[in-house]
Image: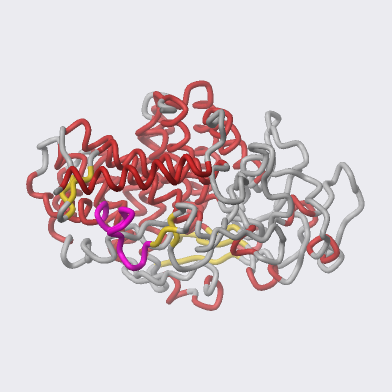
Amino acid sequence: MAPKYTSFIFLFLLLNSFQYSFGGGHDYHDALRKSILFFEGQRSGKLPPDQRIKWRRDSALHDGASAGVDLTGGYYDAGDNVKFVFPMAFTTTLLSWSIIDFKRNIGNELGNAVKAVKWGTDFLLKATAKEGVIYVQVGDAFSDHSCWERPEDMDTLRTVYKIDENHPGSDVAGEIAAALAAASIVFRSLDSSYSNLLLDRAVKVFDFANRHRGAYSSSLHSAVCPFYCDFNGYQDELLWGAAWLHKATRRRQYREYIVKNEVILRAGDTINEFGWDNKHAGINVLISKEVLMGKAPDLKSFQVNADAFICSILPGISHPQVQYSPGGLIVKPGVCNMQHVTSLSFLLLTYSNYLSHANHVVPCGSMTATPALLKHIAKRQVDYILGDNPRRMSYMVGYGPHYPLRIHHRGSSVPSVTAHSARIGCKEGSRYFFSPNPNPNRLIGAVVGGPNLTDSFPDARPFFQESEPTTYVNAPLVGLLAYFSAHPN
């Protein structure tokens, strides 16, 4: 029964792939290069001399001044000009994980990928430099979203929001700890002093998150909701942070923390979710590597959860919350569907490698999920993004002959400072928002929110759920593209 059903899924995926595939295949290395370049278009602060996206200029050079701190730098999360630290930290964690697991496949783009991580970690170090305080957002989102202006002209409120022991935020602090710990592994062989700085700060931030428990959206509800409200609770970020600290330090205290808190912090909840808000599937896959290697039998339950995650997203037997479009795209409820596509596909690929090294497969009822099957599903999702879909359209700006031209992105859609040196005010930019014309500045490498369950896609700025790019869509895609650039078949 098992091999027969596995063959059925392979046949389903192959037929779906052939139906929409380009004749010549994809240039995964070109897509990798562009997916990393995208992050330079999202930079805030003083841009470096080697900035490659030239239509961008310095912006938000006084961030943090109202609070007496330097909070310049970092990334704008999407098409707006706010710095939301929760998704920025998750982006940094996933960029780091991409490098950690697929470093040998990134090739000559490794330097640019590491720079992308460091642009995030440099800001996270600033945000956590003050004892007992963590700065978690710069910019009033309501003020920002009422304007359509490029970041270089930004005159909206740059309010600074923080958490402390009286206003906890274990979710965002736990994610920052994970990002710093993961990045410390990236820099271990490149810059040991910087790596040690990151790891020391990660330890302190995690201790703060664990001692002062609570969700940041409870402490700062009016500022962070509904934008990056923590709907899932802070418990998963504590386990996530501990898992990355254990991987980075090998200290027994973090392993004991995971074992002790597995049930209390609900490790087995929503096992098929992974993104900036919900880390459960990522936690289980990350921890399972040691279990599969035979080094952590006391953490076996995390592998059981990881296996259940795999079974929940297979075509044909997937969980009700995971569907596939007629064109073969993973679709989950909520905004920006591509965040689910890239994050879940990253876990499929990562877990398939762990399974291969352990000579292990995943039993899913009457079928068996092999490492090859998981890689094939992940590759099918990447190929869909790059153009193997019913619209024959790449959802990465600048890749392929046909891609989104009117993305929901202020800097991309408003004329650049070079083209229009005079200031373009808050409401003046509205004419560019509603214009039917293509964006004047191509944000190369940006992957948009993508099509819906029927594979339809409106290439128009007002449809932000479909046309807005985000950093946390691209971050796991870096790892995927790195692997498939080295293993295209």
Q: Which is nearer the eye, 480 or 319?
A: 319
Using the rendered image of the protein, determine whether residue 27 is visible from the camera's viewpoint. no
How many numbered callouts? 0
Our reading of the magenta stretch's main secondary structure is loop
Q: Residue at x 62, y 41 (%)?
A: 445
Which picture quadrant has residue 149? bottom right
Q: Quadrant of the C terminus?
A: top left
Q: Residue at x 46, y 42 (%)?
A: 17
Return the x and y of residue 42 as percentages of the image width and height.
64, 47
Return the x and y of residue 441 as percentages of the image width and height.
77, 45
Q: On the rendered structure, is 44 left or right of 316?
A: right
Q: Which is nearer the eye, 332 or 441?
A: 332
Using the rendered image of the protein, determine whether residue 309 is visible from the camera's viewpoint. yes
Return the x and y of residue 250 as percentages of the image width and height.
21, 38
Q: Residue at x 39, y 58 (%)?
A: 173
Residue 230, placed above or below residue 379:
below
What colour scheme was applied to this rendering of the protein? secondary structure
Q: Which is nearer the eye, 62 or 426?
A: 426
Q: Which is nearer the eye, 12 or 349?
A: 12
Query: Magenta stretch containing residue 224, yes or no?
Result: no
User: Range of the magenta residues?
Assistant: 309-322
Return the x and y of residue 229 as percentages of the image width and height.
47, 70
Query: Magenta stretch containing residue 310, yes or no?
Result: yes
Q: Residue furthest top?
A: 108
Which picture quadrant has residue 259? bottom left
Which picture quadrant has residue 41? top right
Q: Residue furthest left?
A: 297
Q: Residue at x 64, y 69 (%)?
A: 140
Q: On the rendered structure, is 102 left or right of 463?
A: left
